[in-house]
Image: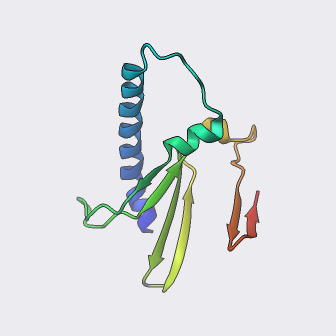
Amino acid sequence: MLAKSVMPRVRRLAAIITTIRTAMTRWFDRSAPSTALPLHRELHHAARFWPVEAAGYDGEDTLPALEEGGVFVFVYFDSEAAEFQFSIDLDTVDPRLARPDGTVPMHITVQGDTVFRA
């Protein structure tokens, strides 16, 4: 699947950006007092959209993705199946979001109706 072939590149890029963001935050916030945001606000402020990247070294385009709290959500149109597909990748989820058993709580809705909750 295309999502699996691009995930190593997306994860690598996300790790690089996180490293740069952390370094820049430490550099510019040296004198600022530490005011921790609530977790939900911290995650919302750090959310990123990853647009499609043109064909890379493997000849395939990446998929657009939304990243929040280390969770990547891909939404794309599969031309072969002629349908929209949604893919959620939890490989890099922020440990603060996981339950003690390692699962990640989720609530998925379509048009306001719950279609999945765990």
Residue located at (36% from left, 45% from top)? 13
In the rendered image, the quadrant that contains the C terminus is bottom right
On the image, the x and y values in percent for residue 28 come to 38, 22
Is 86 drawn above or below residue 36 in the view shown? Answer: below
Residue located at (76% from left, 68% from top)? 114
Residue located at (69% from left, 63% from top)? 108
On the image, the x and y values in percent for residue 6 come to 38, 58
Left-right relation of 82 to 40: left
Residue 80, image quadrant: bottom left
In the rendered image, the quadrant that contains the N terminus is bottom left
Q: Nearer the viewer, residue 70 or 59?
A: 70
On the image, the x and y values in percent for residue 38 come to 65, 33
Residue 61, image quadrant: bottom left
Residue located at (60% from left, 26% from top)? 36
Can residue 48 be seen by looking at this rendering? yes
Visual colour scheme: rainbow
On the image, the x and y values in percent for residue 69 come to 56, 44
